[in-house]
Image (spheres, rainbow, N blue to C red):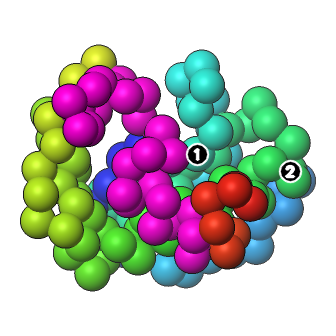
Amino acid sequence: MHLSLLVKPASVPYIQRNSPFKKREEYPVIEKKLDKGVIAEANKDGTIFVSKDVSPVVQKHAVKEEIEHQKDMQSGKLDYTDSNVTYDGKKYPRKNGKILYNGKWLQEGDNRFPWEKGAKTRAYGSVKNA
């Protein structure tokens, strides 16, 4: 997961021609190779990366959630650095692909994080539908 304020990037390539995505002016979607287990990422520059190793159906599903993360970053509700995720003003330490939450180091993207619950609920109606 990559997060922060929206900055419209200049000349960022849009997702490839065989993609299920249309040109998105507000959050350009870029298909690329991502780390193992990562389907999509919301980036600080306003772009969304989506894995080229998953089906178009999975890509579309994941991008819906990443758009919600982008909205949270744009509003100031969500931010991140290499060492922290900040959500609703509270900082959560982050390192080696994990985030400290309620005394446990959980994998980034875990449904127990409040920013994941919020994004999934807005994108899909509930965390269970994600």
Secondary structure beneath label 2: helix
**What amino acid does circle 2 point to?**
Pro
Whole-percent x and y of residue 111? 51, 46
Residue 35 position, x and y percent, is 54, 23
Vertical placement of residue 52 versus 115, above or below:
above
Q: Look at the picture and state if 106 lies above or below 18.
A: above
**Which quarter of the figure is the N terminus placed in?**
top left
Q: Which residue is mark 1?
A: 40
Q: Quadrant of residue 102?
A: top left
- Residue occupying the point 38% across, 59% down: 115
Query: Marks 1/2: CA distance?
Result: 12 Å
Left or right of residue 28: residue 87: left
**Residue 13 located left or right of residue 76:** right
Return the residue at label 2: 56
Q: Nearer the viewer, residue 45 or 66?
A: 66
- Identity of the residue drawn at 20% across and 30% down: 103
Question: Residue 2, relative to residue 75: is it above or below?
Answer: above
In this view, the residue in front, 94 or 7, is 94
| Residue 29 occupies quadrant | bottom right
Q: Residue at x 25, y 38 (%)?
A: 101
100 part of magenta stretch: yes
* Residue 38 at x, y percent in the picture: 58, 32
The answer to whether residue 14 of the structure is visible from this angle is: no
The residue carrying pointer 1 sits among few (fewer than 14), some (14 to 19) or many (20 or more) residues within 10 Å by Cα, namely: many
Q: Which mark is residue 18?
A: none
Task: Say which amino acid is labelled 1.
Answer: Ala
Magenta segment: 97-123
128 and 29: which is toward the camera: 128
